[in-house]
Image (spheres, rainbow, N blue to C red):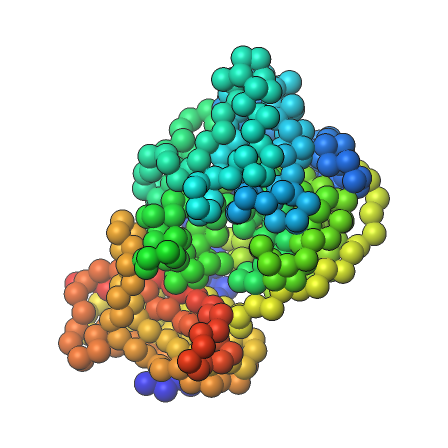
Amino acid sequence: MAAYRLNRRSFLRSLGAQSAVIAASLSRTAASTGAYTVGVGNSSDSYQAAQTAIAASGQFPSVAGQTVIIKPNLVIGQPCTTGITTDPQVVRAIVDLALAGGAKGIVIAEGSCAAGGAPFGPCGYEFFTSYANPPSLIQLVDFTTQPVTLVKVGNSGGLAYQEMWLPVMLTEPNTVFISAGKLKTHYSVGASLSTKNIVGIAPPKEYQVIIASERQDLHYRGINESINDLIRVRPIQFAVIDGVWGMEGQGPTAGTAVPANLVFAGLNSIAVDLVALQAIEISAATVPYMTYAADLKLGPSNTSGITVTGDPFAPIAFTPATTPPIVWRPIPSPNSIGLGQQTTISYNIPQACYAQVQIILDSDVHPGISEVKSLQPFTWQPAGTYAVIWDGTNGSGTLVAAGTYLVQVQAEYVIDAVSTAVNYASALIAVTS
């Protein structure tokens, strides 16, 4: 069925209604309310910059008797001066605060898909194995070797998942989870900061849908939606961004290192990321997971309500990454239909591109994409809002069984023999008997 255009007011009305329903389902611990403060450290001495930023935020959590789990960004085995990985001295500043605060134990954990597992050695983290007294107080842990469990996303499901796999250690009581991200632009989502850093907690094998594509299911369902589902199943309790050496261009690994000499810290990862984006002059509108997080009341929508404290600094214009076209999350109305009923699915593409719309099946327990029906083949579409109709049938015209389905929109700029970057967005649709 060909897509038809919707006016912007109708689309925004449907988006707002669904956002309100989702927001209402958030637990009080997941939602962030009130004033936001972000501390900034400005120094080429990364330990000092981190100390200043954290102290300026005034929000380091109480950790007495708790296990502190610190998640740096160690995507590959490269030193922090490449702009790729989190500086171990920034993490040391967090560790020292946790030790001084009476933490029961400290775990520095990463779920890198790098060959050989989390690259603590090449990234300069091995000194932590003998840093504390007793040495066992600090552990370097590879998330990919840990047992996992399914966790529900909110009370009524998330943006793309109803349940998600997590390492068991992140679900245990008396733990404080700290994201120590990197100041980087990103070829897929626009920027990789403290919030995007949470992708590394998703077990790669549980979300591998084709060989050598760990966590690809998160992308197929929409990486921006998946990020927000992850921070709902395991909220970040304190956020730090290492930008002493940042990265511009085609991050997270193929960009250019920039000596920005900045560290950002605060209680709310969205607020911290917004200040960092402003510092590198990247628009938050080009980082869709930030918009979704604000809609879900996980953090502020802009910097107007954020108090920035600590060292003064001048913005540094980072070269943005070349990304696939943004496609905003489709909105099915209604999002639950009975057998034989239909739903109208609206979606928005802010730039002209090729777009495709499908109904797919994908299990939360055993991820693996299968097409149910194509609603629209790849078609060049001008920027705008469109809609397609699904009547609850498969490609053969037979009514589907009751269950949970996804509408998936794919967007790319060029379709030819050489595959280009593709962006995905999806939403859940319940089919009832």
Residue 398 placement (x, y as % from top left): 15, 76
Q: Is residue 222 left or right of residue 277?
A: left
Residue 419 placement (x, y as % from top left): 44, 74
- Please identify the residue farthest to the top as the structure is shown: 134
- The residue lying at 68 percent from left, 57 percent from top is 256
In the depicted structure, whether residue 175 falls above or below residue 275? above
- The residue lying at 36 percent from left, 87 percent from top is 2
Instruction: Quadrant for the N terminus, please.
Output: bottom left
**Does residue 373 show up?**
yes
Residue 238 placement (x, y as % from top left): 59, 36
- The residue lying at 42 percent from left, 85 percent from top is 379
**Does residue 103 show up?**
no
In the depicted structure, whether residue 311 falls above or below residue 188? above
Give 188 or 417, whichever is nearer the viewer: 417
Residue 35 placement (x, y as % from top left): 67, 42
Query: How many numbered badges does the structure rendering display?
Result: 0
Give 249 or 79, whichever is nearer the viewer: 79
Q: Is residue 162 left or right of residue 279?
A: left
* The image quarter in which residue 36 lies: top right
Q: Is residue 129 left or right of residue 37?
A: left
- The residue lying at 44 percent from left, 35 percent from top is 142
Q: Is residue 87 left or right of residue 261?
A: left
In the depicted structure, whether residue 364 falls above or below residue 51? below
Instruction: Quadrant for the C terminus, please.
Output: bottom left
